[in-house]
Amino acid sequence: MRFNALFDAWAATYDAVVAGADEEYADVFDGYDRILERVAEEVEGPPGALVVEIGVGTGNLTRKLLARGYRVIGVEPSQAMRAEARRKAIGADIREGSFLHLPLDDERVWAFVSTYAFHHLTDAEKEEAVRLMAARLQPEGKIVFADTAFVDDAARRAAVEDARRRGFVRLVRDLENEYYPLVSDLEGMLARAGFRAFFERMNRYVWLWKAVRG
Ligand SMILES: C[S@@+](CC[C@H](N)C(=O)[O-])C[C@H]1O[C@@H](n2cnc3c(N)ncnc32)[C@H](O)[C@@H]1O
């Protein structure tokens, strides 16, 4: 998996970074807990509904989903992240896998959720991931994601320039090498898979989106 080494190495210190310890990423993770809470809130499933979380990392959203009474399958490619998630999110079924290799049997899914992970896929891979999720969702199911996205190319370039001006070398590298989509690209790929999507800006970088059929 493309980013496994990075996330295996990052697992032990990840929670400090999302809490704001790393100045370079403070804007990206601004309001992190509130963003995860909003994703969990938007699931709006009946008690015990199956929620599949992809790219669980250290299990912070997983815990919020469990607290709301959902049955949670967590999918995560990094071994070290899986270990952290299993330690912190007791009761979740944490499985090795990825957006493109969903380790699911014939379970029907109420919701797919994910935070800060979708940008690890190229746009073609994102499109394929949406198709795979659509095939598994119950008819009234939904996809609720939050991740960095930009309104247009000018906004993406401005973010890179701003990070460069502030000397944020690692953030610049991420913004230039990972696959941050435009909001309109997300909307298009969801529409092609038969979804209507609603977008909400959560901070300078992150957008929450909810997709339902129709
Ligand atoms: C920045 S962390 C986010 C973790 C957590 N969701 C959160 O919000 O704190 C990104 C996570 O996505 C995972 N990831 C990377 N590529 C992935 C892929 N192709 N499929 C699923 N997860 C992936 C990484 O291993 C890592 O745990």
Image: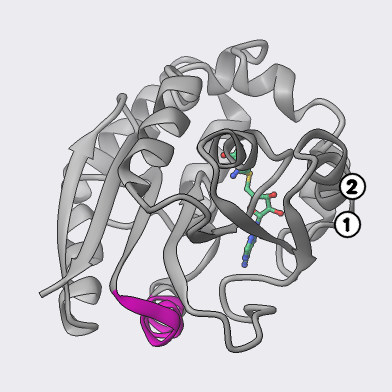
Look at the magenta stretch and give its main secondary structure.
helix
Which residue is painted at 24% across and 83% down in the image?
193
User: Depth check: 76 or 164 in front?
Assistant: 76
User: Depth check: 7 or 69 in front?
Assistant: 69
Badge 1 element: helix
Q: Where is residue 120 in the image (x, y as percent from the top left)?
A: 55, 60
Which residue is painted at 85% across and 40% down in the image?
84
Is 56 placed left or right of 26 in the picture? Answer: right
Amino acid type indicated by mark 2? Ala
Is 189 placed left or right of 59 in the picture? Answer: left
User: Depth check: 35 or 13 in front?
Assistant: 35
Query: Where residue 79 is drawn, which disc sits there?
Result: 1
Q: Where is residue 54 in the image (x, y as percent from the top left)?
A: 58, 59
Q: Is mark 2 within 8 Å of ligand 1?
A: no
Quarter holding the N terminus is bottom right
Amino acid type indicated by mark 1? Gln
Q: Which of marks 2 and 1 is in front?
A: 2
Is 168 placed left or right of 43 in the picture? Answer: right
Which residue is painted at 51% across and 67% down in the image?
121
First to last magenta residue range? 127-139
For label 2, count other residues whose C-alpha is less than 10 Å away and answer few (under 14), some (14-19) or many (20+): some
Tell me if residue 51 is in the magenta stretch.
no
- Determine which residue is flagged by label 2: 83
Q: Looking at the rendering, which quadrant does residue 177 occupy?
A: bottom right
Are circles 2 and 1 on residues that touch, CB within 8 Å?
A: yes
The mark tally for this picture is 2
